[in-house]
Image (tube, rainbow, N blue to C red):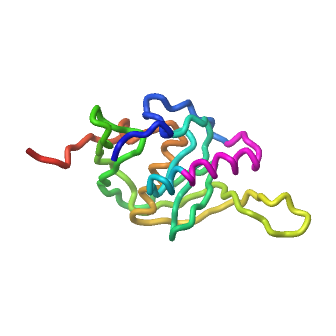
Amino acid sequence: MKNNDLILNVENFPKVNQKNDQNLFESFDIFSRLENICRERNLFSLSACQIGVPSSLFVFRRENKFDYFFDCDYVGIGQTIQSIEQCSSIFGDSGNYRTFEVSRFFEVDISGKLLDICREPNSSGLISKEVNFRESGRNAVIFQHEIDHCKNISISQIGKEINLFYD
């Protein structure tokens, strides 16, 4: 995969505000941009800081539907695993994504907020829902990866770069 001009290199990320300070409509616009980029590039998830927006927003695709999360945190449960990860914001000189081995929890409890569309009469249309749920496996790794972005942490800081291609 090649780098593109919509997604910033990790060195150019803005410092993320730990809490979302946009109103729900501004947040929805950012979420929509993130979702469109994910659909165009076939990505599972993307954080606002990866497109230059200093906010704790990220989108996550589950079962071909994107959920809009913000102000999230995670608590690891039990054992850690070694995860092999790439990030659309960390690429080498050739433009290919670099690969890292990162210690992650196999299971995590997620807390935060979810932006949802309200179909009730006399509603503004957008609501913020408090969420608390548990994820495991690949989804747990992706949530940790995106929430780490929202905390100004990248896999290049916490992982070990590896080469999957041997001569």
- State the residue at coordinates (56%, 53%): 36
**Residue 155 drawn above or below residue 79:** above
- State the residue at coordinates (66%, 58%): 114
* Left or right: where 98 falls relative to 45: left
- Residue 90 at x, y = what percent? 37, 38
Q: How many marks?
A: 0
Q: Quadrant of residue 137?
A: bottom left
**Residue 146 drawn above or below residue 121:** above
* Left or right: where 117 falls relative to 37: right
The magenta span reads: 20-36
Question: Is 27 within the magenta?
Answer: yes
Is residue 78 or residue 53 the one in the foreground? 53
- State the residue at coordinates (11%, 47%): 166
- Residue 150 at x, y = what percent? 54, 42
* Left or right: where 152 falls relative to 106: right
> Magenta stretch mostly in which secondary structure?
helix
- State the residue at coordinates (44%, 57%): 42
**Image quadrant containing the C terminus:** top left
Instruction: Tell which residue pokes out farthest to the right in this image.
Output: 122
Question: Is 137 within the magenta?
Answer: no
- Residue 158 at x, y = what percent? 36, 40
